[in-house]
Amino acid sequence: MQERIAVIFDFDDTLGADSTTGFLQQAGLQNIDAFWKEVGGLMAEDWDPVPAYLNHMVTAAKDGRIQPITKQDLQAWGKDVPLFDGVEDVFPHLRRIAKEANPRVTLEFYLISSGIGDVLRHTRIAHEFTDIWASEFNFDAHGNATTPRKIISFTDKTRYIFQVQKGIIGQASRGKPFAVNKKLSSEQLRIPLNQMVFVGDGYTDIPCFSLIKQQGGIPIAVYDQKHTEKWGNAFQFVADGRVSNLHSANYQEGSDLTNFLSMAVRSLAERIAVSASSYQG
């Protein structure tokens, strides 16, 4: 009996403001709207969204619109990325809820994002995650970003949910892209999909929402109160039946989102306790 729960988060507009836009502004980009419009133009030419924005960042650096993109600058920005209210406190809060409901259960947190890994691995909350998967740049001998090295978007994200399920996590799992295809029995799975919560905000999260819901887990959509233009997109996830609930991205204690996350974790922990009792009996 697997007595573990996974709460899996997206990052941008889920746990904090858009980290890529923030980096571009800090790197000197004068017209952020024009940049994203140009990315949209690439998408109209049949580029996928994530390689489009990563490649266009490299182009902007070559054109002199932003300073060269270095690993050090990305990591430094990660330390300053603004987080939504209450985010730093929600992790210990949910761990307490899980232990109160079932002292035997282990609660783990994961991050699966289309954002830039060198940024996200250096945020103030990076230490809370058992593992982090994100898009990556390749760097030349001078330390400047040249090309995307890893793309995570849409169904790519579900790959990492299956890695959580099968326990293909941590440094030992790196450089083994085909390990996720290994067939395991239900008893060998580290965390079943119905013991997962997925929290996201955007179109790249739809495959994860659908997978988690179909398998009996709990998908939750959030929206940033400051970006009303995105509210309609978030509500559509509810209208389409893709998520269990929709909340403002406010993680302060007592907020609707934190209350719902607490109820979700408590429910899963109690369900595991009942299943374990039946399994042992």
Image: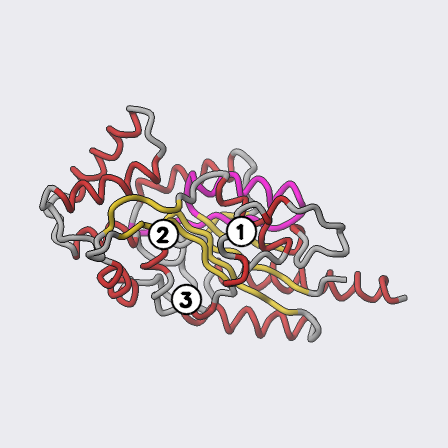
Give the CA separation, mark 2 to mark 1.
27 Å
Q: Mark 3 belongs to which amino acid? A: Ala
Question: Residue under circle 1?
Answer: 176
Mark before the other along the chain sequence, 2 or 3 = 2
Which label is found at residue 126?
3
Give the CA separation, mark 2 to mark 3.
14 Å
Question: Which residues fall within the magenta stretch?
Answer: 201-226
Q: Is residue 141 above or below residue 212?
A: below
Q: Mark 2 belongs to which amino acid? A: Asp
Do callouts 2 and 1 mark residues in contact (Cβ within 8 Å)? no
Q: How many marks?
A: 3
Q: Residue at x 36, y 52 (%)?
A: 12
Which label is found at residue 12?
2
Q: Residue at x 44, y 72 (%)?
A: 89
* SS under mark 2: loop
The quadrant in which the C terminus is found is bottom right
* SS under mark 3: helix
